[in-house]
Each structure stands twice: as C-alpha cells, then as structure tokens.
Amino acid sequence: MAIPGSVLIVDDEAHVRAFMKLVLEKLGISTIYEAGRLDEAREKFATHSPELVTLDVNLPGGSGLDLLREFRAVNDDVLIVMVSTEVQAGVVNEAVDAGADGFIRKDLPREQILTELKEILAD
C-alpha cells in the first residue's frame, strides 16, 4: 500500500476535518491541508497538488460531486475519496461514474474508516 505524501480534506464541518485528520495521521500522513469552502478547496488543490483528496458530497454553495469532476479534469491521477453520511445508491453511483476512487461514510468509527481507506489505497 502506497501512503500518499499529501492530502486535502474538504468538508464544511471543522469537527469532521479534525476527525479525518486524526484518521489520516494514523496512516502516517503528515502533510494534510484542509478546506471548508469550495473556493478554498480549489485554491489549495491548485497550490498544493495533493496526492489524495477526501471530499464531502454536500458543501455550502455547491456540490462535492461537481468539485470531484473539476479535480479529476485537472489531475486524473489524484486519488479522490468521497466522504459523506449520504449513502443513497444514486449518489454513490454518481460519484463512481464521476471518477471517485472510493466512497466512505464519515459517521463510521475511526478504525473502520481507517480500514476502508487502507483498502482504497491498496487498489
């Protein structure tokens, strides 16, 4: 399993970003950027070129799915994992069709999220 050198966490909720940061640090990732808004996410993605992006589906002022398409158009090699409490089949399918490398429920226990991230990184 190749551990990404840098990660961008995109979520409008600060406590979720903090939680995801803890999970990612458990994987051994030390370069972690955070964004709570679409414009901030775009700027940090362009500036830092992260190897992995965790991306919330629902963001104020826009859709994480649209941002996924934007990021994928700029860098087809970046790993993008959608993270949401919304797990309707239509949303998951749309994310996969748009190029998501995985989909994780953010309301799962930390160890389960860690396991799922490891599985995605191993593919």
Image (cartoon, helix red, strand yellow):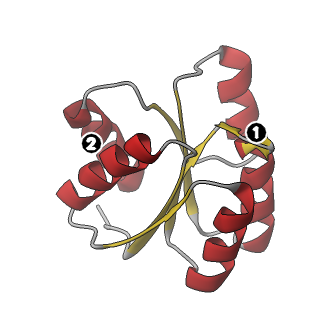
Residue type at the position of mark 2: Leu
- State the residue in front, 3 or 107: 107
Residue type at the position of mark 1: Asp
Q: Position of residue 28 (x, y in %)?
A: 20, 66
Hey, which residue is sitting farthest bottom in the picture?
47
Asked whether residue 123 is in view, the answer is no
- State the residue in front, 79 or 16: 16
Q: Quick check: 118 left or right of 74?
A: left
- State the residue in front, 14 or 122: 14
Q: Residues within 10 Å of mark 2 (few under 14, many from 20)?
A: some
- Which residue was labeled with disc 1? 97
Q: Residue at x 58, y 48 (%)?
A: 55
- Which residue was labeled with disc 2? 114
> Which numbered disc covers residue 117?
none
SS category of the residue bearing label 2: helix
Q: Quick check: 66 left or right of 122?
A: right
Q: Position of residue 40 (x, y in %)?
A: 66, 66
Question: Residue 96 falls in which quadrant of the image?
Answer: top right
| Relative vertical location of residue 32 with respect to residue 121 in this rendering, above or below | below
Q: Position of residue 17 (x, y in %)?
A: 42, 49
Q: Sequence order check: which comes first, mark 1 or mark 2?
A: 1
SS category of the residue bearing label 1: helix
Q: Residues within 10 Å of mark 1 (few under 14, many from 20)?
A: few
Q: Position of residue 120 (x, y in %)?
A: 41, 47
- State the residue in front, 108 or 118: 108
